[in-house]
Amino acid sequence: MAAVGSYTKHGRYQGKTHEGLRSGSGVYTFSNAFFEYEGKWEEGMMQGEGVLRMRDGATYEGQFENGEMTGRGMRKYANGTTYSGEFVQGELHGSGTWISAEGEQYEGHFSHNMREGKGKLAMSDGELYEVRAHAARRRRLSPPLTRTPSLLRAASRRTSARVRAHRPARPATCTRANGTWAASLGAAG
């Protein structure tokens, strides 16, 4: 059953419902009008594939689980920075590629929005490094993440990285195959 609901305190929804809950495909504009979600719903929660748009131009396209950005996805920030990879409850968590608006590219592991463990870092001038971020001393990614309607927490630790220089690599590429976003740094030339 298709329905259009306008709830002063809860936002506006257009799409399918089941037993009074958002279910199937639909578009929901949150009550603060900063967020709009278009995608799959299950028992009133964002579930499966969807797109979350923010009024500042930022977007997330990917998987949702129990109302959270969880699974693989692509996050584009308002300033042009992108992240393609794994998310857990709205946080960069797992393997992924982060590309800053200035051209810095990091491919590796993340834990609670911070670089964690081994990774590859390509600077905007073409220099390529292997880095290791330590749990005790990590650097918060820039720009700060926009708070999502649920549990996006900001971290404030700093990163310490051992680096080993390499020659330039090809720039990172972002592609979408079989409904999944992927990004990778090119091999050394």
Image (cartoon, rainbow, N blue to C red):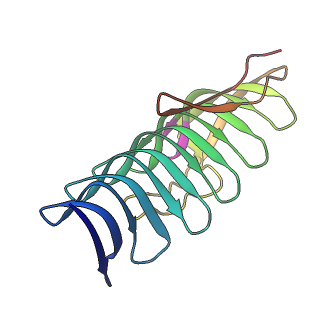
Tell me where residue 188 appears, x and y as whole percent: 78, 16
Q: Main secondary structure of the magenta part?
A: strand
Q: From what the image shows, is residue 189 above or below residue 141?
A: above
Q: Which residue is drawn at the image coordinates 74% and 16% (left, top)?
A: 187
Judged left or right of residue 150, residue 120 is right
Q: Quadrant of residue 99?
A: top right
**Quadrant where the image shows the N terminus:** bottom left
**Quadrant where the image shows the C terminus:** top right
Q: Which residue is drawn at the image coordinates 55% and 55% (left, top)?
A: 59
Q: From what the image shows, is residue 188 above or below residue 36?
A: above
Tell me where residue 146 appears, x and y as whole percent: 54, 62
Tell me where residue 132 appears, x and y as whole percent: 61, 28
Q: Nearer the viewer, residue 175 or 166?
A: 175
Q: Let me know if residue 12 is in the magenta part.
A: no
Q: From what the image shows, is residue 122 above or below residue 83?
A: above
Q: Which residue is drawn at the image coordinates 45% and 48% (left, top)?
A: 91
Q: Let me know if residue 114 is in the magenta part.
A: yes
Q: Nearer the viewer, residue 180 or 107?
A: 180
Residue span colored magenta = 110-115
Q: Which residue is drawn at the image coordinates 65% and 53% (left, top)?
A: 142
